Image (cartoon, rainbow, N blue to C red):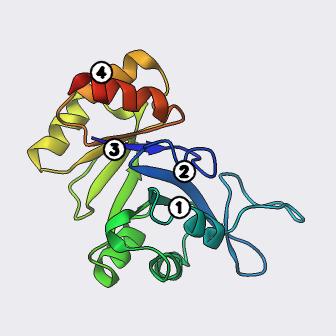
């Protein structure tokens, strides 16, 4: 079971989570920065380099690509500082995931979706609202691992941690998720 701390930098770097999840965008200067929302002129955001420097050797990094067009450049920049084994990339764009897998086969790449489909991605990242039995059974039938986001409610966490069809959860509460995972063992 993978626990990925949503919006994980810098708060969750030492939480014990398997990954921190950070949203990546490119600013007007061409620098990759961390921001869930669209960038506003004059806004200050941590850079991808700052996150990778802080996280190296401490936690894996899940890059959630919020824009398309620079996908391979983002992954290349991350790999310059971070090992592929500790890196995961998510995107809602199938073409992005395919390009990443073609160029960087050792990097885990997943589709962020509201529905599931057969795919050559390493995993599907489903919004918790769409992690239905039907969707999870479909993924299990095709051996597609599922990461569910953003799971913050204890009751859902318990359910998803116990569900063998789910490979990981993305949460704002990794401390609780890790405790529940540990208690399950």
Q: Are marks 3 and 4 in contact (CB under 8 Å)?
A: no
Q: CA distance from mark 3 to mark 4?
A: 13 Å
Q: Earlier in the sequence, mark 4 or mark 2?
A: 2
Q: Secondary structure at mark 4?
A: helix
Tag 1 near tag 2, CB within 8 Å: yes
Q: Residues within 10 Å of mark 1 (few under 14, many from 20)?
A: many
Q: Which residue is mark 2?
A: 13
Quarter of the image for the N terminus: give it: top left
Instruction: Write down the residue under mark 3.
Output: 147
Q: Is residue 43 above or below residue 16?
A: below
Left or right: where does residue 130 sit relative to residue 48? Answer: left
Work out how far the residue at label 4 is from the one at label 1, CA to CA, in angstroms.
29 Å
- Which circle's residue, 2 or 3, is located before the other in the chain? 2
Q: Nearer the viewer, mark 4 or mark 2?
A: 2
Q: Position of residue 105 (x, y in %)?
A: 27, 77
The residue singled out by tag 1 in the image is 55
Residue displayed at 52% across by 82% down: 73
Q: Earlier in the sequence, mark 3 or mark 4?
A: 3
Pointer 3 or 1: first along the chain: 1
Camera sees residue 34: yes
Give the residue displayed 35% in from the left and 73% down from the top: 84
Separation of marks 3 and 1 at Cα, in angstroms: 21 Å
Picture residue at 62% right of the left edge, 69% below the top: 48
Name the residue that disc number 4 marks: 159
| Cα distance in 3D space between marks 2 and 3 | 19 Å
């Amino acid at each position: 079971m993978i626990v990925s701390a949503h919006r994980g930098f810098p708060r969750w770097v030492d939480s014990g989570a398997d990954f921190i999840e950070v949203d990546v965008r490119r600013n007007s200067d061409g620098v990759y920065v961390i921001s869930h929302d669209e960038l506003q002129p004059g806004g200050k955001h941590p850079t991808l380099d700052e996150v990778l420097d802080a996280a190296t050797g401490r936690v894996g990094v899940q890059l959630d690509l919020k824009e398309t067009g620079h996908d391979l450049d983002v992954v290349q920049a991350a790999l310059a500082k971070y090992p592929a084994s500790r890196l995961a990339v998510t995107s809602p764009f199938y073409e992005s995931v395919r390009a990443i897998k073609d160029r960087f086969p050792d990097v885990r790449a997943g589709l962020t979706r509201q529905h599931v489909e057969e795919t050559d991605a390493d995993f599907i990242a489903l919004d918790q609202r769409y992690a239905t039995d039907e969707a999870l059974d479909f993924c299990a039938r095709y051996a597609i691992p599922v990461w569910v986001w953003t799971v913050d409610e204890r009751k859902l966490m318990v359910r998803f941690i116990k569900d063998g069809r789910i490979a990981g959860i993305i949460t704002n509460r990794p401390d609780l998720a890790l405790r529940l995972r540990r208690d399950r063992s």
